[in-house]
Amino acid sequence: MTGLERLPGGLVDRNRCIAFTFDGHPYLGFPGDTLASALLANGVRMVGRSFKYHRPRGVFSAGSEEPNALVQLRRGAYREPNTRATVAELFDGLDATSQNYCGSLRFDLLAVNDLLASFLGAGFYYKTFMWPQALWERLYEPVIRASAGPGRLSGDTDPDVYDRGYLHCDLLVIGSGPAGLAAALVAGRSGARTILVDEDFVMGGRLHAETHEIDGQPGGAWAGSVVAELGALENVRLLSRTTVIGAYDHGIYGAVERKTDHLPDSKGKPRQILWRVHSRRAILCAGAIERPIAFGANDRPGVMLAGAVRTYANRYAVAPGKRVGVFTNNDDGWRTAVDLAAKGVEIAAVIDTREMAPPVDVTSVEVRMGGRITTTWGRKGLKAITLATGEKIAMDCLAVSGGWNPAVHLTCHQRGRPIWRDDIAAFVPGTGLPVGMAVAGSVNGSLSCGAALREGHDAASAIMQDLGIGLAKDALPAASDESVAVMPFWRVTESRGRAWVDLQNDVTVKDIQQAHHEGYRSVELLKRYTTLGMATDQGKTANVVALAILAEHGGRSIGDIGTTIFRPPYTPVSIAVFAGRSRGKAFRPTRLTPSHVWAEGRGGTFVEASGWLRARWYPVSGETHWRQSVDREVRLTRSGVGICDVSTLGKIDIQGEDSGTFLNKVYANGFAKLPVGRVRYGLMLREDGFVYDDGTTARLGKTHFVMTTTTANDGLVFRNLEFARQCLWPGLDVHLASATEQWAQFSVAGPRSRDLLAKIVDPPFDLANDAFPLMACGTVTVCGGAPGRLFRISFSGELGYEIAVPSRYGVSFMAALMTAGEDFDAVPYGVEALGVMRLEKGHVAGNELNGQSTAKMLNLERMISRKKDCIGNVLSQRPAMNRQDGLAMMGFRPLDRSVELTAGAHFLAMDAEDRMAADEGYMTSVAHSPELGYSIGLGFIMRGPERVGETVRAWDAVNGKDIPVEIVPPHFVDPQGNRLRG
Amino acid sequence: MADHALTAASPLAGYARTIGDVLLTEVGDYNLCSVAAPLGEDEALVDSFDVPRPATGQSSISTDGATRLLGLQPDQILILFRADDPDRAADQVAAAMKTAAYVTDQSDSWVLLALEGADVCPVLERLCMLDLDDAAFPAGAVSRTVMEHLSVIILRERDNRFLLFNPRSSARSFLHAVETAAETVLLQSNEPVSVRHRRGTS
């Protein structure tokens, strides 16, 4: 068979052939084929092995519900496992392989599992691999994962690119079957902004799979003309190859558009786009999914859903078998026999479980009313079936219909619970639909073509009126209401062999019975115990049959048992599309300091800190180790002057008559009385009383303050201040503006810093100690007139300043500072040297402000003013946070000065055991101190201030260190602060 | 002090590039100040400019086209203009006010990236979550929003021209995202990713 001999009709383009391979064998198909239809056309029936028993499996459905035909597409890094062949559009050169076997697809060594089936029932993992526990990770799990596991990822980085985007509409129509097209037509003609989405590459849904007539023309032709009309409307957007994967809050839907999956090469364009669709209203027209009937050996290649068999014949012009039987419990199943017979396919028999007269007159076809299939024959493909009567009928394809389940999935995404309808023996959407969502057509249980058209038309009309959009005069398309009568029939009780319920997870009727026998009554637990309804199809064909069997055993009705509900995504989604463009360097934005270009030119080494690239140190020639660079930067700063870009600190401009009052409320210490021209260090508490940020705030004018925050908390503090301003104290005259990006700010520190600034700050500004003492601030001009702000503050413990100019001058100003500092051997220093100096001085940073520290732990409890209220004030007074024997920040130095300390070490008494119970605290920061010549650390230890001089162990199991350290005050350098006041 | 005279640098070095029919340019030579009215004196802002006070979400422009007020929140407006002396932009605004107001210079906080062309909306569709339909976001409309994890102000200057105010420190990352979106939407094929990453470090 070449794959080119087809039935008449269909939507494939016979003018061109497509060459593709499956497991290395070349085949031909037509444009318009899926991989599944092309394989069937080529007579390939066995396309994979089942999950657990490695049984031969063939194509079962014609849509995204496919449980069997999972294949791997493409090669190398482009390989994508677990793709459903039923939705994989055929393209030139498509390279598909089967999966889940050991050896080859035809001779799978793991098919031995099938012989061991009686030992592999429900929950066998839990029962079998109990002991010894140690073997689970080393033996059991690797073996299970190697044997049971669908396809394999390449392990390489995904070379495709992905994108995301945002869409807006009045009406989102999900699904383009008769209901969806009728709805979109109403909305489109009314001028509403409409988006019509369908997961298929051809719009029209089952109209292409059936032989309905609408307005006197074939249903498929009607769909084509409607899609053409909609495509010409500016207010309508058609998204085919797009799956709505989830319904989220406020009418927002997630949709994945597959842009290039049907092309041999993406050419660098996004393979898929994740759209966030903002809709005012949505109509779900997702249709229904046919379900099987459980009977013995019902999993052989050739056993298919009846609707799928019709789809292959009518849409793809492929006969899935030469002699086709039908097994049904409803009138719809008979359509398969009628349609295939009309195309000249031999019908072996129609077996209807119902005891009644045949609903359709199919001449010259064997009919078995009240018939039940007990088992099937054919090792790698169906050859015959046996009825309960013992009659054996030869056939190579069996079309099974157990009725239709509305595709209610999206209606459950906000915890909507489907309700059972006896008349169609299926769950339909219940209450609790996502806000703004309506349902129409088969998904609503209206299973005939005429009903679907009517519901889609009516739902859209109602929404148009509701939205105040004038309704275009529009006639309802005319179609017949074909019979869809069904009599529930779930399983053939006479079958003695295994009868599959969930083909994808190899769950049989017996597994469900066993689970029930073992006490699993809840459908949620049944699912987890048996693995029913898991993996790529999420039980789209299996769930309701399983529920029926559970109900039968419990003597309850299906409605009473209820169903599991569904969560996003509707079908499997590539993780990469969620990342979109945010990959590699574009994972998140990179922030560059105002002097970044200068630092690059200077050969700086950079580190990422809270999204910023900050210069870490500036190596000079001859330095081979980072410590040499950092030590040099520290020494030269402490002996002369050093310059560091500190623009990353958050800066918040606070203006208004009540700014001082406002600051009093957000800072633990007082600010209202801070004089103009002065700076104060402030401590900020969370509501729970713990410290969350610190920084200095300067008063530039009577109504004007500038707050600094830590780099990491810039956004958080600003957000909290805005909340406080707008919501807590709206009566205060306070206005906030973020000034972080506006100002390039530099620390100029060291004994020569004043001399350097004298060459930068324009006269007549007086920098003398009396005129501009520690904690002074002022507005200045620099470098001959540029605006600047000067603060006399010090993080290093040296005489120090911070000076700010508008960011546009950042590079130029850094260069000017270095030029002006040449006479003083000025050195640029990075964040490592900054960290060393703050540690030598005993200043806290992020390691100490870790969200678990209290003011008392930081020896700053006296900063919390009890004369006024502030956020966190009351809860900071909780006894447990003020224990005298609690943790306190102290300094630590090794008894053996040659030893390097490590942060994260825990403090233990010298004679204590290495146990958590003996833990007395932990080291937060360590550094080598060039000033002292040995390693020093800061950390929290119980009763710290009383224990100065005591020796404890800094025990670090991670690094294998156990170092005796002496507890010392946290200020290692200039504890009296003479340098910074100098 | 003239030996240390400072020179201003723009974060994107005067970037301009045409992708498809969309022109991307860094807009320089402007000043931006926020002006907040003292509590309860919101109305005072109205009288101080030769420009109607815009409602939140809208902007208004002076008759000579030189000054645009952006309404972004109830008690504050942004003024986009060209200062006589860029180093004294806030002083100039404060002096123009008839009543006291709190002025903050934000000229260096934001980078203005202009996107102009017939296909600008399909490009922005990949970046901006706002509804930019003509009816929902007509010429003159302005909003704060988030793009690429960044706080961005979007202003529709004309039907086919948008200004994206994005934070200065991350301007290169933002530009990369906008370029990528424009190339994706407007070009037949995108350049290899590695080449794209290397460019744009001017």
Image (spheres, rainbow, N blue to C red):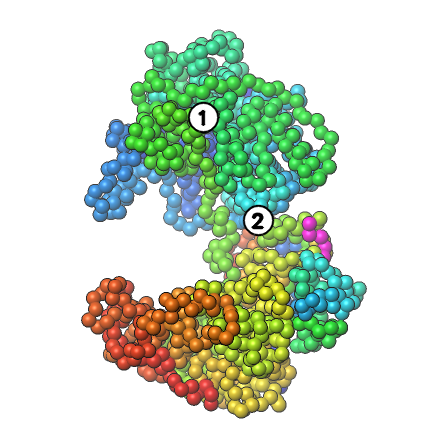
Q: Secondary structure at mark 2?
A: strand
- Tell me the chain of label 1: A
Which residue reaches farthest right?
A: B63
**Residue A155, placed above or below residue A219:** below
**Residue B128, placed above or below residue B1:** above
Pick the front one: A778 or A836: A778
Quickly name the residue at label 1: A291
Where is residue B64 shown, x and y percent of the image? 79, 66
Q: Which label belongs to residue B127?
A: none
Mark 1 vs mark 2, foreground winner is: 1
Q: Which residues are magenta?
A: B136-140
- On the same chain, marks 1 and 2? The answer is yes
Identify the residue shown where x is 44% and y is 45%.
Answer: A78
Q: Which label belongs to residue A165?
A: 2
Amino acid found under the numbered disc labelled 2: Gly
Identify the residue shown where x is 46% and y is 67%.
Answer: A874
